[in-house]
Protein backbone atom coordinates (compact mmCIF):
# COMPACT_ATOMS: atom_id res chain seq x y z
CA UNK A 1 0.00 0.00 0.00
CA UNK A 2 1.18 3.51 -0.65
CA UNK A 3 -0.23 7.00 -0.47
CA UNK A 4 -0.57 8.79 -3.82
CA UNK A 5 -1.52 12.43 -4.44
CA UNK A 6 -4.83 12.77 -6.27
CA UNK A 7 -3.03 14.79 -8.94
CA UNK A 8 -0.74 11.80 -9.57
CA UNK A 9 -3.37 9.07 -9.70
CA UNK A 10 -3.83 7.19 -12.94
CA UNK A 11 -6.75 5.05 -14.08
CA UNK A 12 -6.36 1.41 -13.09
CA UNK A 13 -4.99 2.02 -9.60
CA UNK A 14 -6.94 0.17 -6.89
CA UNK A 15 -8.10 1.83 -3.67
CA UNK A 16 -6.80 0.31 -0.45
CA UNK A 17 -9.41 2.05 1.73
CA UNK A 18 -12.95 3.38 1.65
CA UNK A 19 -13.03 7.04 0.57
CA UNK A 20 -15.39 9.35 2.41
CA UNK A 21 -16.19 12.94 1.55
CA UNK A 22 -16.12 15.75 4.10
CA UNK A 23 -19.68 14.99 5.19
CA UNK A 24 -18.72 11.38 5.86
CA UNK A 25 -20.58 9.93 2.86
CA UNK A 26 -18.97 7.06 1.00
CA UNK A 27 -17.54 8.19 -2.34
CA UNK A 28 -15.74 4.97 -3.36
CA UNK A 29 -15.23 1.75 -1.47
CA UNK A 30 -12.08 -0.27 -0.93
CA UNK A 31 -10.92 -2.30 -3.97
CA UNK A 32 -12.52 0.16 -6.38
CA UNK A 33 -10.49 0.38 -9.59
CA UNK A 34 -9.98 4.04 -10.42
CA UNK A 35 -11.17 5.46 -13.71
CA UNK A 36 -10.48 8.85 -15.22
CA UNK A 37 -13.95 9.95 -14.11
CA UNK A 38 -13.40 8.66 -10.57
CA UNK A 39 -10.14 10.61 -10.27
CA UNK A 40 -11.93 13.79 -11.33
CA UNK A 41 -14.53 13.06 -8.68
CA UNK A 42 -11.86 12.73 -5.96
CA UNK A 43 -10.40 16.06 -7.02
CA UNK A 44 -13.89 17.55 -6.98
CA UNK A 45 -14.23 16.50 -3.34
CA UNK A 46 -10.86 18.15 -2.64
CA UNK A 47 -9.47 14.80 -1.45
CA UNK A 48 -5.75 15.53 -1.71
CA UNK A 49 -4.45 11.95 -1.66
CA UNK A 50 -5.57 8.34 -1.32
CA UNK A 51 -3.96 5.07 -0.31
CA UNK A 52 -3.75 2.62 -3.17
CA UNK A 53 -2.97 -1.08 -3.30
CA UNK A 54 0.38 -2.14 -4.62
CA UNK A 55 0.55 -4.66 -7.35
CA UNK A 56 1.87 -7.76 -5.57
CA UNK A 57 2.74 -9.69 -8.68
CA UNK A 58 6.08 -11.36 -8.27
CA UNK A 59 8.68 -11.11 -10.95
CA UNK A 60 11.83 -13.16 -11.48
CA UNK A 61 15.15 -11.56 -12.30
CA UNK A 62 15.50 -13.54 -15.57
CA UNK A 63 12.17 -12.15 -16.73
CA UNK A 64 13.33 -8.56 -16.58
CA UNK A 65 13.90 -7.35 -20.11
CA UNK A 66 15.55 -4.06 -21.10
CA UNK A 67 12.97 -1.29 -21.19
CA UNK A 68 12.94 0.95 -24.21
CA UNK A 69 12.90 4.60 -23.31
CA UNK A 70 10.13 6.52 -25.02
CA UNK A 71 9.52 10.27 -24.96
CA UNK A 72 7.08 11.36 -22.24
CA UNK A 73 3.45 11.53 -23.35
CA UNK A 74 2.27 14.91 -24.53
CA UNK A 75 -1.31 15.93 -23.88
CA UNK A 76 -2.74 16.92 -27.18
CA UNK A 77 -4.22 20.36 -27.06
CA UNK A 78 -7.55 20.60 -28.83
CA UNK A 79 -7.81 22.79 -31.92
CA UNK A 80 -10.33 24.85 -29.99
CA UNK A 81 -7.90 25.44 -27.14
CA UNK A 82 -5.07 26.28 -29.57
CA UNK A 83 -7.37 28.74 -31.30
CA UNK A 84 -8.21 30.44 -27.97
CA UNK A 85 -4.59 30.66 -26.87
CA UNK A 86 -3.41 32.08 -30.19
CA UNK A 87 -6.00 34.86 -30.31
CA UNK A 88 -4.89 38.45 -29.56
CA UNK A 89 -7.82 38.90 -27.20
CA UNK A 90 -6.71 35.95 -25.10
CA UNK A 91 -3.21 37.42 -24.89
CA UNK A 92 -4.69 40.68 -23.62
CA UNK A 93 -6.90 38.82 -21.14
CA UNK A 94 -3.90 36.86 -19.86
CA UNK A 95 -1.81 39.99 -19.34
CA UNK A 96 -4.66 41.72 -17.53
CA UNK A 97 -5.29 38.61 -15.38
CA UNK A 98 -1.63 38.45 -14.33
CA UNK A 99 -1.50 42.13 -13.41
CA UNK A 100 -4.78 41.95 -11.52
CA UNK A 101 -3.66 38.85 -9.66
CA UNK A 102 -0.74 40.73 -8.12
CA UNK A 103 -2.78 43.77 -7.10
CA UNK A 104 -5.61 41.56 -5.84
CA UNK A 105 -3.18 39.62 -3.61
CA UNK A 106 -1.92 42.94 -2.25
CA UNK A 107 -5.36 44.36 -1.47
CA UNK A 108 -6.65 41.14 0.12
CA UNK A 109 -3.56 40.84 2.32
CA UNK A 110 -4.01 44.48 3.37
CA UNK A 111 -7.64 43.83 4.26
CA UNK A 112 -6.88 40.72 6.29
CA UNK A 113 -3.62 41.65 7.99
CA UNK A 114 -3.85 45.46 8.26
CA UNK A 115 -7.63 45.73 8.39
CA UNK A 116 -7.53 48.24 5.53
CA UNK A 117 -10.84 49.30 3.97
CA UNK A 118 -12.16 47.48 0.90
CA UNK A 119 -12.76 49.45 -2.28
CA UNK A 120 -15.57 47.49 -3.96
CA UNK A 121 -15.68 49.78 -7.01
CA UNK A 122 -11.98 49.30 -7.75
CA UNK A 123 -12.20 45.53 -7.26
CA UNK A 124 -15.24 45.31 -9.50
CA UNK A 125 -13.70 47.52 -12.21
CA UNK A 126 -10.66 45.24 -12.40
CA UNK A 127 -12.77 42.13 -12.81
CA UNK A 128 -15.08 43.65 -15.38
CA UNK A 129 -12.11 44.85 -17.37
CA UNK A 130 -11.10 41.24 -17.91
CA UNK A 131 -14.49 40.36 -19.39
CA UNK A 132 -14.14 43.01 -22.12
CA UNK A 133 -11.78 40.79 -24.11
CA UNK A 134 -14.41 38.16 -24.82
CA UNK A 135 -16.13 38.18 -28.18
CA UNK A 136 -18.55 36.06 -30.14
CA UNK A 137 -15.96 33.37 -30.85
CA UNK A 138 -14.17 33.23 -27.49
CA UNK A 139 -16.20 33.55 -24.31
CA UNK A 140 -14.90 34.56 -20.88
CA UNK A 141 -15.46 30.94 -19.80
CA UNK A 142 -13.12 29.82 -22.60
CA UNK A 143 -10.52 32.35 -21.48
CA UNK A 144 -10.63 31.10 -17.87
CA UNK A 145 -10.35 27.55 -19.10
CA UNK A 146 -7.10 28.29 -20.85
CA UNK A 147 -5.54 30.14 -17.91
CA UNK A 148 -4.97 27.08 -15.82
CA UNK A 149 -1.27 27.55 -15.17
CA UNK A 150 -2.31 29.93 -12.41
CA UNK A 151 -4.16 27.37 -10.33
CA UNK A 152 -3.96 28.34 -6.73
CA UNK A 153 -6.43 27.70 -4.00
CA UNK A 154 -7.18 31.26 -3.07
CA UNK A 155 -6.27 34.20 -5.31
CA UNK A 156 -6.50 32.96 -8.90
CA UNK A 157 -9.40 30.75 -7.83
CA UNK A 158 -11.26 33.76 -6.38
CA UNK A 159 -10.70 35.76 -9.56
CA UNK A 160 -11.98 32.85 -11.64
CA UNK A 161 -15.05 32.50 -9.45
CA UNK A 162 -15.71 36.26 -9.74
CA UNK A 163 -15.50 36.07 -13.53
CA UNK A 164 -17.75 33.02 -13.65
CA UNK A 165 -20.25 34.79 -11.35
CA UNK A 166 -20.20 37.81 -13.64
CA UNK A 167 -21.03 35.69 -16.70
CA UNK A 168 -23.55 33.64 -14.71
CA UNK A 169 -25.46 36.79 -13.67
CA UNK A 170 -25.88 37.58 -17.36
CA UNK A 171 -27.31 34.11 -17.98
CA UNK A 172 -29.74 34.68 -15.09
CA UNK A 173 -30.70 38.08 -16.57
CA UNK A 174 -29.76 39.86 -13.35
CA UNK A 175 -29.58 43.66 -13.46
CA UNK A 176 -26.37 45.69 -13.26
CA UNK A 177 -26.50 46.07 -9.49
CA UNK A 178 -27.05 42.36 -8.85
CA UNK A 179 -24.31 41.52 -11.35
CA UNK A 180 -21.83 43.78 -9.61
CA UNK A 181 -22.79 42.35 -6.24
CA UNK A 182 -22.45 38.68 -7.20
CA UNK A 183 -19.09 39.42 -8.86
CA UNK A 184 -17.81 40.92 -5.60
CA UNK A 185 -19.31 38.03 -3.62
CA UNK A 186 -17.30 35.67 -5.86
CA UNK A 187 -14.14 37.68 -5.50
CA UNK A 188 -14.25 37.70 -1.69
CA UNK A 189 -15.94 34.35 -0.97
CA UNK A 190 -12.78 32.58 0.23
CA UNK A 191 -11.15 35.52 2.02
CA UNK A 192 -11.36 33.49 5.26
CA UNK A 193 -8.78 31.07 3.82
CA UNK A 194 -6.13 33.67 4.59
CA UNK A 195 -6.79 33.00 8.26
CA UNK A 196 -6.10 29.27 7.86
CA UNK A 197 -2.45 28.24 8.29
CA UNK A 198 -0.64 27.73 4.97
CA UNK A 199 0.62 24.40 6.25
CA UNK A 200 -2.97 23.14 6.08
CA UNK A 201 -4.17 24.96 2.95
CA UNK A 202 -1.14 23.87 0.93
CA UNK A 203 -0.68 20.47 2.54
CA UNK A 204 0.11 17.83 -0.09
CA UNK A 205 -1.06 15.09 2.27
CA UNK A 206 -4.51 13.84 3.09
CA UNK A 207 -5.98 16.18 5.69
CA UNK A 208 -6.74 14.77 9.09
CA UNK A 209 -10.27 15.19 10.48
CA UNK A 210 -9.04 18.03 12.66
CA UNK A 211 -7.39 19.77 9.71
CA UNK A 212 -10.60 19.41 7.68
CA UNK A 213 -12.56 21.01 10.47
CA UNK A 214 -10.11 23.90 10.46
CA UNK A 215 -10.39 24.34 6.66
CA UNK A 216 -14.17 24.50 6.95
CA UNK A 217 -13.91 27.45 9.31
CA UNK A 218 -12.79 29.66 6.39
CA UNK A 219 -16.51 30.33 5.88
CA UNK A 220 -17.10 31.75 9.36
CA UNK A 221 -13.71 33.49 9.38
CA UNK A 222 -14.49 35.18 6.05
CA UNK A 223 -17.86 36.31 7.36
CA UNK A 224 -16.24 37.76 10.47
CA UNK A 225 -13.71 39.74 8.44
CA UNK A 226 -16.28 41.09 5.97
CA UNK A 227 -19.02 41.99 8.41
CA UNK A 228 -16.65 44.46 10.07
CA UNK A 229 -16.65 46.45 6.83
CA UNK A 230 -20.13 47.77 7.45
CA UNK A 231 -20.17 49.94 4.32
CA UNK A 232 -20.19 46.77 2.19
CA UNK A 233 -23.39 45.13 1.03
CA UNK A 234 -24.19 42.40 3.61
CA UNK A 235 -24.66 39.80 0.85
CA UNK A 236 -20.86 39.80 0.44
CA UNK A 237 -20.34 38.61 4.03
CA UNK A 238 -23.28 36.15 3.73
CA UNK A 239 -21.74 34.66 0.59
CA UNK A 240 -18.44 34.07 2.38
CA UNK A 241 -20.39 32.38 5.18
CA UNK A 242 -22.79 30.32 3.04
CA UNK A 243 -21.07 29.38 -0.24
CA UNK A 244 -20.54 25.80 0.99
CA UNK A 245 -24.16 25.40 2.09
CA UNK A 246 -26.15 23.10 -0.19
CA UNK A 247 -29.76 23.44 -1.26
CA UNK A 248 -30.64 20.05 0.29
CA UNK A 249 -29.10 21.01 3.63
CA UNK A 250 -25.97 18.85 3.29
CA UNK A 251 -23.48 21.73 3.30
CA UNK A 252 -21.62 23.64 6.00
CA UNK A 253 -21.14 25.53 8.31
CA UNK A 254 -24.83 25.97 9.23
CA UNK A 255 -26.44 23.06 7.37
CA UNK A 256 -29.27 25.33 6.21
CA UNK A 257 -31.32 24.50 3.11
CA UNK A 258 -33.24 26.05 0.20
CA UNK A 259 -34.05 29.73 0.15
CA UNK A 260 -32.56 30.17 3.62
CA UNK A 261 -29.21 30.19 1.87
CA UNK A 262 -28.45 33.68 0.63
CA UNK A 263 -29.34 34.08 -3.07
CA UNK A 264 -25.85 35.30 -3.95
CA UNK A 265 -24.20 32.50 -1.97
CA UNK A 266 -26.27 29.98 -3.97
CA UNK A 267 -24.86 31.40 -7.20
CA UNK A 268 -21.30 31.63 -5.84
CA UNK A 269 -21.53 28.00 -4.65
CA UNK A 270 -22.18 26.80 -8.21
CA UNK A 271 -19.38 28.94 -9.71
CA UNK A 272 -17.03 27.75 -6.94
CA UNK A 273 -17.64 24.03 -7.58
CA UNK A 274 -17.38 24.58 -11.34
CA UNK A 275 -13.98 26.22 -10.98
CA UNK A 276 -12.77 23.45 -8.68
CA UNK A 277 -13.93 20.73 -11.07
CA UNK A 278 -12.52 22.32 -14.20
CA UNK A 279 -9.20 23.23 -12.66
CA UNK A 280 -8.54 19.75 -11.24
CA UNK A 281 -7.28 18.54 -14.58
CA UNK A 282 -3.52 18.61 -14.43
CA UNK A 283 -3.15 14.87 -14.87
CA UNK A 284 -5.67 14.40 -17.63
CA UNK A 285 -5.00 17.08 -20.20
CA UNK A 286 -7.72 19.04 -21.95
CA UNK A 287 -10.97 19.52 -20.19
CA UNK A 288 -14.30 18.35 -21.52
CA UNK A 289 -17.27 20.47 -20.37
CA UNK A 290 -19.73 17.63 -20.95
CA UNK A 291 -17.90 15.53 -18.38
CA UNK A 292 -18.15 18.37 -15.88
CA UNK A 293 -21.88 18.61 -16.51
CA UNK A 294 -22.10 14.87 -15.97
CA UNK A 295 -20.35 15.26 -12.63
CA UNK A 296 -23.03 17.72 -11.52
CA UNK A 297 -25.67 15.27 -12.80
CA UNK A 298 -24.09 12.41 -10.81
CA UNK A 299 -23.75 14.62 -7.78
CA UNK A 300 -27.46 15.35 -7.87
CA UNK A 301 -29.07 18.61 -8.87
CA UNK A 302 -30.88 18.73 -5.52
CA UNK A 303 -27.71 20.14 -4.01
CA UNK A 304 -28.17 23.39 -5.91
CA UNK A 305 -30.86 25.95 -6.50
CA UNK A 306 -32.85 24.28 -9.31
CA UNK A 307 -33.30 27.41 -11.40
CA UNK A 308 -29.66 28.42 -11.00
CA UNK A 309 -28.12 25.05 -11.78
CA UNK A 310 -30.23 24.42 -14.88
CA UNK A 311 -29.50 27.90 -16.25
CA UNK A 312 -25.81 27.50 -15.52
CA UNK A 313 -25.36 24.09 -17.11
CA UNK A 314 -27.60 24.82 -20.10
CA UNK A 315 -25.47 27.82 -20.90
CA UNK A 316 -22.24 25.91 -20.43
CA UNK A 317 -23.29 23.22 -22.89
CA UNK A 318 -24.82 25.74 -25.31
CA UNK A 319 -21.40 27.31 -25.69
CA UNK A 320 -20.31 24.07 -27.32
CA UNK A 321 -23.27 23.53 -29.64
CA UNK A 322 -22.04 22.92 -33.24
CA UNK A 323 -18.52 22.12 -32.04
CA UNK A 324 -16.71 19.10 -33.44
CA UNK A 325 -16.13 16.41 -30.84
CA UNK A 326 -14.39 13.09 -30.43
CA UNK A 327 -16.61 10.30 -29.11
CA UNK A 328 -15.39 7.57 -26.78
CA UNK A 329 -15.71 5.02 -29.62
CA UNK A 330 -13.14 6.99 -31.63
CA UNK A 331 -15.61 8.52 -34.09
CA UNK A 332 -15.60 12.23 -34.78
CA UNK A 333 -18.83 14.18 -35.03
CA UNK A 334 -20.60 17.46 -34.50
CA UNK A 335 -22.95 18.42 -31.67
CA UNK A 336 -26.20 19.16 -33.45
CA UNK A 337 -28.61 19.35 -30.52
CA UNK A 338 -28.36 19.62 -26.74
CA UNK A 339 -30.71 17.45 -24.70
CA UNK A 340 -32.48 19.63 -22.12
CA UNK A 341 -33.29 16.60 -19.98
CA UNK A 342 -29.82 15.12 -20.06
CA UNK A 343 -27.38 17.95 -20.61
CA UNK A 344 -24.24 15.81 -20.70
CA UNK A 345 -25.71 13.63 -23.47
CA UNK A 346 -26.38 15.69 -26.61
CA UNK A 347 -27.16 14.51 -30.13
CA UNK A 348 -23.99 14.03 -32.16
CA UNK A 349 -23.86 13.60 -35.90
CA UNK A 350 -20.96 11.70 -37.43
CA UNK A 351 -20.32 10.92 -41.10
CA UNK A 352 -22.20 7.66 -40.73
CA UNK A 353 -24.80 8.08 -38.05
CA UNK A 354 -26.71 10.37 -35.69
CA UNK A 355 -26.10 9.40 -32.09
CA UNK A 356 -28.50 10.33 -29.32
CA UNK A 357 -26.01 9.90 -26.48
CA UNK A 358 -28.80 9.63 -23.90
CA UNK A 359 -29.80 6.36 -25.62
CA UNK A 360 -26.30 5.00 -26.15
CA UNK A 361 -25.08 3.18 -23.10
CA UNK A 362 -21.46 3.95 -22.30
CA UNK A 363 -20.88 6.26 -25.27
CA UNK A 364 -19.77 9.73 -24.29
CA UNK A 365 -17.93 12.80 -25.55
CA UNK A 366 -14.23 12.29 -25.00
CA UNK A 367 -13.21 15.80 -25.98
CA UNK A 368 -14.08 18.95 -27.83
CA UNK A 369 -11.98 19.22 -31.00
FE1 LIG B 1 -14.73 28.08 0.09
FE1 LIG C 1 -13.82 28.71 -3.25
Image (cartoon, grey):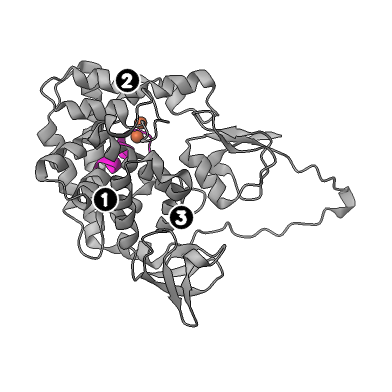
Extreme residue toward the bottom, this view: 352
Question: Where 239 falls versus 272 (above or below)?
Answer: above
Characterize the local packing of mark 1: few (<14), some (14-19) or many (20 or more) Cα atoms within 10 angstroms: some
Residue corresponding to mark 2: 220
Q: Is the magenta stretch mostly helix, strand or loop?
A: helix
The nearer-to-camera label among 2 and 1 is 2
Question: Where 133 falls versus 321 (above or below)?
Answer: above
Characterize the local packing of mark 2: few (<14), some (14-19) or many (20 or more) Cα atoms within 10 angstroms: some
Residue beneath the point at 32% across and 60% down: 85
Disc with the residue nearer the chain's start (3 vs 2): 2
Residue corresponding to mark 3: 291
Q: Is residue 151 visible?
A: no
Residue beneath the point at 13% across and 32% down: 120
Which residue occupies the foreground of this view, 57 or 311?
311
* Residue range highlighted in magenta: 151-162
Disc with the residue nearer the chain's start (2 vs 1): 1
| Secondary structure state at the residue bearing disc 3 | helix
| Secondary structure state at the residue bearing disc 2 | helix
Q: In this view, does 234 lie to the left or right of 55?
A: left
Q: Is residue 310 visible?
A: yes
Asked if the residues shown at circle 1 and circle 3 are in contact, with their CB atoms under 8 angstroms apart, the answer is no
Which residue occupies the foreground of this view, 292 or 153?
292
How much space separates mark 2 and mark 1, taking CA atoms? 32 Å
Where residue 201 sits, quadrant-wise, is top left
How much space separates mark 3 and mark 2, taking CA atoms? 32 Å
How far across and down, in percent of the image, does residue 217 sit? 38, 20
Q: In this view, does 323 lie to the left or right of 188?
A: right
Residue beneath the point at 52% across and 40% down: 42
Residue corresponding to mark 1: 94
Amino acid sequence: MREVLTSELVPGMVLADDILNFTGQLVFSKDFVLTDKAITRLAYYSIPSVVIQDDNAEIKYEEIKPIEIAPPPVFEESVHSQMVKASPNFQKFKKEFEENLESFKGSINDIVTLNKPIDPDALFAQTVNMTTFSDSSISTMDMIQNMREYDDLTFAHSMNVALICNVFAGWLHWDAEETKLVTLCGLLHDIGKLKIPDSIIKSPNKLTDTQYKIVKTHTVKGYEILKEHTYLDPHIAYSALMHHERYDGTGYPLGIAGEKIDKYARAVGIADVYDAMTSARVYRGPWCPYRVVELYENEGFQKYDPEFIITFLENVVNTYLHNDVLLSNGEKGNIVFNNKHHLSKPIVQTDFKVYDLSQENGLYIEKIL
